């Protein structure tokens, strides 16, 4: 969309000062995000997002959830005596007529947040301190939401991490073969790897998660780049609340470790770079447990490592499904991007599988420290 049109959309929101520029921002695969600057004297900047309506079918409910979660978290920081609780949670900027989203003439849905200056998010991380901060962020997030009744939240994306749902979608994608890619040899190799693990993953899920652990409100998209750090490298705020819904803590742990532990990128075309960074795994786990130990059951603690295997498996399934479908879900930056993502996540899964004992030792050490 042309920048002047985005600025026009931005002017529908109750900003301090008049929006004067809009520039693409961030690296999300789903929504389109812009940084909006204004001529206001307080220099406040904003994030404007076009919500992906193909994925989010009920935007009013999505925004209801988000408002609820933001207010709950802010109140927690306020009660804890935090000096500026408004900077510790996402802040929604309403439209000039007081709504949490704007619907354009062409039917697109937009929303706006305050941009927290002097905060940073990282697609890949380098230091153990950053990993520890990430663990604190998501552990604290789950803790703060632990007293919010799950039924107060709408289930925005049903069966989001459900193995059957994802694998069935893959099977249908293969049958429909919309993108005419299901028979490519690299795809067949990947599919073999997926289906040869399916029974084991299903059994592990039943035993370690479904039968043993409670559902809680979780984030459901705990990539490290969904944590904002401040200039001192400490947690400022957890962002991207689109998928906050009931789920199992092992999902959040597994999805976080997927990005924390990988020496390569999520979509690294050089598979040799996808190796495990154990010190970062240890630091994240310590940070997470520093917050979560007090509310996790023993069975939940025991389920965490299974989550580390489950989530990369589901990512392989999801990326290859979208590749076969012809790239309808994730934003792609080149022709076979989803295939490259799937291959990279499979390599990560193989690394994780062959190092499970080492990971378990590290986790056990973190538990007693
Ligand atoms: C998507 O919003 P974004 O780009 O962080 C996806 C997540 C995946 C992730 C993979 C709503 O997240 O589930 O884990 O890509 N979000 C949705 O990078 O499907
Ligand atoms: Mg997201």
Image (spheres, rainbow, N blue to C red):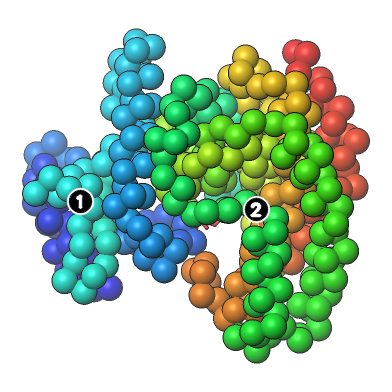
CA separation, marks 2 and 1?
A: 40 Å
* Residue 20 relative to residue 92: left or right: left
* Residue 168 relative to residue 28: left or right: right
Q: Mark 2 points at which residue?
A: 162
Residue 59 vs residue 137, the one in the foreground: 59
| Nearest to N terminus: mark 2 or mark 1 | 1
Q: Name the residue under label 1.
A: 37
Relative vertical location of residue 125 with respect to residue 185 in this rendering, above or below? above
Quadrant housing residue 265: bottom right
Place of residue 365 in the rendered image (x, y in percent of width and height, measured from the top left): 81, 20
* Residue 251 relative to residue 61: left or right: right
Label 1 crowd bin: few (<14), some (14–19), many (20+), radius 10 Å: many
**Farthest residue, direction bottom:** 180
How many badges with numbers are in the image?
Answer: 2
Residue beneath the point at 65% across and 89% down: 180
Relative vertical location of residue 94 with respect to residue 350 in this rendering, above or below? above
Q: Is mark 2 on a helix, strand or loop?
A: loop
Quarter of the image with the C terminus in it: top right
Residue beneath the point at 83% across and 34% down: 359
* Disc ID at residue 347: none
Mark closer to the observer (2, 1): 2
Q: What element carries label 1?
A: strand
Residue 37 vs residue 352, the one in the foreground: 352
Quarter of the image with the N terminus in it: bottom left
């Amino acid at each position: 969309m042309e920048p002047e049109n985005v600025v026009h959309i931005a002017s529908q929101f109750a900003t301090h000062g008049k929006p004067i520029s809009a520039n693409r921002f961030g690296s999300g695969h789903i929504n389109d995000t812009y940084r909006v600057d204004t001529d206001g004297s307080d220099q406040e900047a904003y994030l404007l997002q076009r919500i992906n309506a193909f994925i989010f079918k009920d935007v009013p409910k999505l925004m209801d959830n988000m408002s609820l979660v933001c207010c709950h978290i802010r109140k927690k920081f306020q009660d804890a005596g935090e000096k500026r609780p408004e900077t510790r949670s996402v802040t929604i900027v309403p439209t000039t007529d007081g709504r949490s989203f704007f619907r354009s003439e062409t039917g697109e849905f937009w929303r706006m947040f305050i941009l927290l200056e002097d905060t940073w998010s990282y697609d890949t991380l380098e230091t153990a301190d950053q990993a520890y901060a990430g663990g604190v962020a998501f552990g604290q997030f789950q803790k703060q939401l632990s007293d919010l009744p799950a039924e107060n939240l709408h289930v925005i994306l049903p069966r989001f991490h459900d193995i059957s749902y994802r694998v069935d979608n893959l099977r249908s994608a293969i049958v429909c073969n919309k993108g005419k890619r299901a028979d490519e040899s690299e795809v067949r190799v990947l599919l073999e790897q997926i289906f040869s693990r399916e029974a084991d993953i299903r059994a592990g899920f039943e035993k370690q998660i479904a039968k043993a652990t409670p559902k809680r409100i979780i984030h459901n998209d705990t990539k490290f780049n969904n944590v904002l750090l401040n200039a001192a490298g400490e947690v400022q705020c957890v962002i991207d609340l689109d998928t906050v819904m009931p789920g199992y803590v092992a999902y959040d742990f597994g999805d976080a470790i997927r990005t924390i532990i990988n020496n390569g990128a999520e979509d690294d075309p050089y598979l040799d770079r996808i190796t495990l960074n154990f010190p970062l795994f240890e630091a994240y786990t310590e940070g997470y447990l520093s917050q979560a130990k007090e509310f996790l059951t023993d069975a939940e603690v025991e389920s965490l490592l299974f989550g580390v295997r489950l989530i990369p498996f589901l990512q392989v399934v999801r990326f290859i499904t979208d590749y076969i479908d012809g790239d309808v879900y994730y934003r792609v930056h080149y022709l076979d991007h989803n295939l490259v993502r799937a291959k990279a996540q499979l390599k990560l899964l193989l690394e994780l599988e062959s190092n499970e004992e080492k990971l378990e030792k590290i986790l056990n050490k973190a538990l007693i420290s």
